[in-house]
Image (spheres, rainbow, N blue to C red):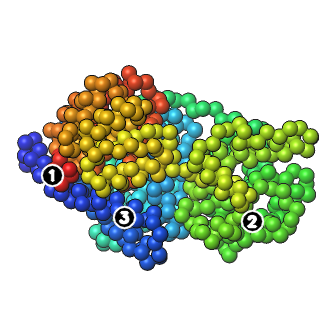
Amino acid sequence: MQKDSSELNDTTRFLANTLHEIRTPIQTIIGAAELMQSTLLDKEQKEYIRQILFSAEGLLELANNILDFAKINQNGFKIENIPFDIAYVTEHVVDSESVKAFNRGVELVLDISPNVPALVTGDSMRVRQIMLNLISNAVKFTKEGYIHVELDYNKKDGICFSVKDSGIGISAEKQEKLFTDYFQADISTYRLFGGTGLGLSISKNLVNIMKGEIGVKTNPTGGSIFWFTLPLPVAIGNHEEIKFSKNPAKQRILIVDDSQLAADSLKNKLNSLGFTQVQVCTDAAEVVSILAEAEVSGNPFKIAFIDMVMEGGIDGWHVGFDIHQVGSISTSLYLLVPEGQMHEDAKMKFLDLYRGYLYKPIKKNMLVSLLSEELYEIEQLESADKGEKIIKIEELIPLTPAEEKSEREKASGNVKASIPKENAAEGLKILVAEDHPMNRKLLETFLKKFGAEVYLAENGVEALEIIENVPEISMVFMDIYMPEKNGIEATKELRAMHYNEIIIACTANNDSNDFDEYKRSGINDILVKPFKSETLKAMVEKWKAVMQTLSVEQINLINGGAVFDYPFEESEDSK
């Protein structure tokens, strides 16, 4: 017999209140452990911290899944609609799982089609949640082989996402029940690998709410293929045109990787950028002869990308050493490094063998950055041979502080490195209004790490004073319950002062009745306690993209009809 809405709401409220009591102390555990990771620790201490985080994050995931499941089954659950970069979201999710995959020896490959729009409109947090569930399941159940993540777009289906793995696979009979509530394909398997079985049910409900489709089928070569489609409206379709200083079609590139899947993926990325002379070598023993023969023919390879981890006893280090032993090869060598696999001792070896490196799975923007710099230097060397004046690339492009630090490090070893930077909040001035010292410290530390200039307030009165003195602050993280003046009161006064920037509530609130009050006060979004550094980073990136894309008037329209991710309830513990 189906429960009436009042009974369901009472059950949801009870779950929310109970889970709130669990989530509040998890915030301190996770935050403190993440901060400790940035201090000097020996190997034993690092392992203890890893175990603390693993257990705390598992508990948090369980609490969030139970709460999500309860909310989705409650009438009135809504999805927000804000422009976001779905390609970046996909890369971010894949990055978060890549170390786990590569640590197990599993090749993780990401392919994003050029058809994917620059920006789509939808709920980026919920889309990320679905992607993360499918990818983390693939990593969990794949002991060897590969995981292939693909993102595409077509007018009929909209966004098309799939995860293909070579894992344990699922029988056709169990595939039919897999997305039902509480179903687990094999109880013993879930006990071995972990999980509650709620994730896929939640993912299906979210996809249904967004009017999409989700499913699973058997991978013909072994394993499974999970997929979903979402009809997300296109906000901005066209990407910026990428231009290189040298004609890409004339540059020969060699890819050395024992994984045909990974090599083909990189080749396709290069082809899409106009590099048509790309050769793949899956046998590391043949690399030296291929490069040497190209030199003799008078048509050498300009660049060689060489995988660091290969089977057969010859890895990227051996290949680099053998090439340098020849001495007559002019090719620029770049190392392909699986995320999390290059340790400090390896980086020392790197200095003498390679000009730079790219992390796997390879992201297009990092590849473009490396190729742009490499081709520019080739052009400058050719100009020098003709007696022309050389203009350094540093004179043309202003460097950020993080890039200046990277340049100093590269100069000390005469090495170029294409390294992802923690610059999610670069250029932003952000105010943190939070009365709890630990939460305030966590937000400050993480935001500074992301490149922000951070201002601190212990209550709403101080927050107003700081905004008056520093009106160029573009984002505020506002605790709801603070002394002297709470977050709702402070937000209303800021909006009355015509402060039109982004205000994000920080709360462990689980009461849906408070949702409308937050919305009416002028709050744009909610950061859920407990939060992790990656959650905070995603929140900053999301609203930074909105600010760069939309005008104040358009953001105000979103404010007027915004739907936030979580309805929460406040308790004394979260103050």
Q: Nearer the viewer, residue 47 or 390?
A: 390
Mark 3 secondary-structure assignment: helix
Where in the figure is residue 177, as x and y percent of width and height? 29, 56
Q: Which residue is mark 2?
A: 352
Q: Nearer the viewer, mark 2 or mark 3?
A: 3
Say which quarter of the image contains residue 311: bottom right
Q: Please determine whether, in this image, residue 505 is positioned above or below residue 53.
A: above
Q: Which residue is mark 1?
A: 572
The CA distance from mark 1 to mark 2 is 58 Å
Visible residue check, residue 177: no
Residue at the bottom extreme? 44
- Name the residue rendered at 67%, 38% in the picture: 397
Q: Specify which label sits upstream in the sequence, 3 or 1.
A: 3
Q: Which residue is mark 3?
A: 33
Where in the figure is residue 100, as x and y percent of width and height? 47, 64
The CA distance from mark 3 to mark 1 is 24 Å
Mark 1 secondary-structure assignment: helix
